[in-house]
Amino acid sequence: MSTVSSNRKSGENSRKLQPSTRTQNAQGKSRPSQQVTLPGNLSPSGGSDGISSGPKPPPNKRSSFEATYRGILRALYEGRLVPGQRLVESDLTEMFQTGRGTIREVLNRLSSAGIVSIVPNRGAIVRYFSRREVMQILDVAELLLGLALRQAALHIREPGNGDQLEQTFQKLSEYDPRVEPADFYKARESFYRTILRIGRNQELPRLFPNLEVHLMRVQFRAFGDGLDNHTIQDYERMYKAILSGDPVMAEIVGRHHVELAAQNVARLPDRSFARGE
């Protein structure tokens, strides 16, 4: 199958991050904030966050570092921080009751993971993607989702795996994303988690660009469906492909799922993206 290319996130603190009515993108242009409840494939509340880039803090700073790091991730997943929004060190220091050194370490780690951009003379900004960056991330996502479905198909006959997949898909099919978006997004997260769990590849959750994909969904929400153009039939095709136990077919279906999203993104207007090559 051909790959579409070049046309292709601690508990909350006492104070909540609240973006202004309008936020500044990396080019300094004002954009409306997007309030969403879409979770990523991996939750920032515990376990793997899917991001391993960047140095680990010293043991005596780890508790403060982790609380701040996960607090920012949670705000990204919940849409209280949005693409293009500037992260002011003094605000974060007050919010998380920690020092500027810890805030800078957290921002550096997020920067090395591709979630935050450090802009000279402006500081840290939640990443706002160019068209080329979006297509490159989707190229990676296509390969990894195909691999995830392939691995799941290889292990679907093991005891309990088919039942788990059926339960999560049935839950997903109960919701209409146009009427119950928050419930649908939560069920979709569970569906993807189940696929990864069945596949038993411990590296895939770490490698999959789940937070980048989430940020792109938020970025495109103001311009139509963006990455959220799939119907329940698209998820049913993935479900049935895994149940078939055919790893080759499952991989093809997984990759095609991302190709559909990439084709939709390719039709978005230039104003949907940051300036870039």
Image (tube, rainbow, N blue to C red):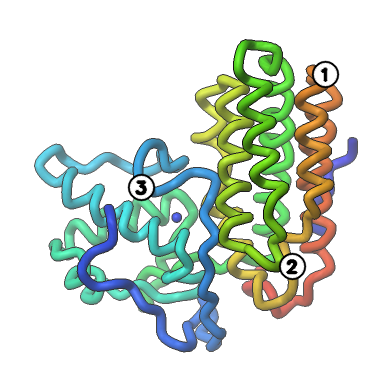
In the figure, is residue 239 to the left or right of 200?
right
**Residue 113, relative to residue 224: is it above or below?**
above
Q: Secondary structure at mark 3?
A: loop
Percent of width and height locating residue 150: 73, 24
Residue shown at 36% from the left, 78% from the top: 18
Distance between mark 3 and mark 1 Cα atoms: 34 Å
Label 1, residues with CA under 10 Å away: few <14, some 14-19, many ≥20: some
Which residue appears at 84% of the width and 57% of the height? 263
Q: Quadrant of residue 164?
A: top right
Residue 139 in view of the camera: yes
Q: Nearer the viewer, residue 243 or 122?
A: 243
**How many residues crowd mark 2 within 10 Å: few (<14), some (14–19), many (20+)?**
some
Taking depth in this image into account, of 220 and 35 the one nearest to the observer is 35
As drawn, which residue projects farthest toward the right?
1
Counting residues from the start of the chain, the first of labels 1 and 2 encountered is 2
Which residue is depicted at the point 78% across and 36% down? Answer: 238
Which residue matches tag 1? Answer: 246
Q: With respect to residue 185, does 54 lie above or below?
A: above
Q: Amino acid at mark 3?
A: Ser
Q: Which mark is residue 78?
A: none
In screen coordinates, is 5 left or right of 277? right
Question: In the image, 209: left or right of 71?
Answer: right
Residue 224 in the figure: left or right of residue 18: right
Q: Which residue is mark 2?
A: 225
Query: Residue tagged by mark 3?
Result: 45
Give the Cα distance between marks 2 and 3: 27 Å
Q: Position of residue 112 (x, y in %)?
A: 42, 50
Residue 247 pos. (x, y %) = 79, 20
* Label 2 vs 3, first from the N-terminus: 3
